[in-house]
Image: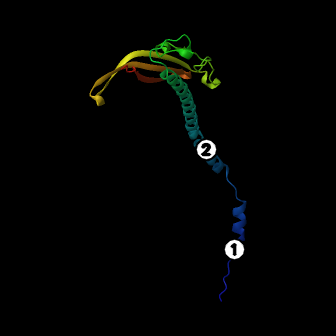
Amino acid sequence: MQRHTYHFDYQLLITTQKRGLSILECLIATMILSTVVLSLAPVLSAGRSNLEYGEMAIRGIRIGEHLLEEIHVRDYSAIGSTRKDWGLDDYHGFSDTPGAVTDFAGTLYDMKDQIYTRSVAVNSDSVILPELGGITVDGKRLTITINGPHDNEWVLTKFIREPHTP
């Protein structure tokens, strides 16, 4: 069996272990690291802004959809004296203001939802349905506009057909 012998240059090992980074190498490494960090800062900031806008949009549209559903289930031609018994046309011109956004029973929404305004427009309209041979359906166009902070606005519309009377 053959034996292998290895020779180490201990002097080279000792001198390499003692050697550190020079000032120039530290400066170059710091410049590279700071360039990377500074280039990522705007990306992270933009990402955060997009997340905040997304949450704001979801909240605004949600309270707009609540009002849309509240109005949609109302009697088409009824006239009421309070919001609890309003008909469809009674909602025309209705609006909530920041700090006073409520549901139909008068219950305030969460404080995070109190930064929005909601306004309603109900207008007579008709729709032509080409799929059904071009018939015209009469009804009302319900438009809900939600305004949020920073001049953000979302608009929800729904056509509600006039009930058919036999």
* Quadrant of the rendering where the N terminus is positioned: bottom right
| Amino acid found under the numbered disc labelled 2 | Met
Q: Residue 47 or 115: which is nearer the viewer?
A: 115
Locate the C terminus and report the quarter of the image it occupies: top left
- Three-letter amino acid code at the position of disc 1: Phe
Tag 1 residue: 8
Give the colour scheme of this rendering: rainbow
Disc 2 designates what residue? Answer: 31
Residue occupying the point 56% across, 40% down: 39
Q: Secondary structure at mark 2?
A: helix
Along the horizontal axis of the image, is 144 left or right of 16?
left
Sequence-wise first label, 1 or 2: 1
- Give the residue furthest to the bottom: 1
Q: Position of residue 2 (x, y in %)?
A: 65, 87
Where is residue 52 drawn, in percent x and y? 58, 31
Answer above or below: position of 34 versus 130.
Answer: below
Question: Which residue is painted at 65% across and 49% down in the image?
Answer: 26
Distance between the Cα atoms at labels 1 and 2? 37 Å
Observer able to see residue 153: no
Quadrant of residue 34 within the rendered picture? top right
Q: Is 75 placed left or right of 113 in the picture? A: left
With respect to residue 26, does 149 lie above or below?
Answer: above
| Residue nearest the observer in this picture, 51 or 126 | 126
**What count of labels does the image hold?**
2
SS at mark 1 in the image: loop
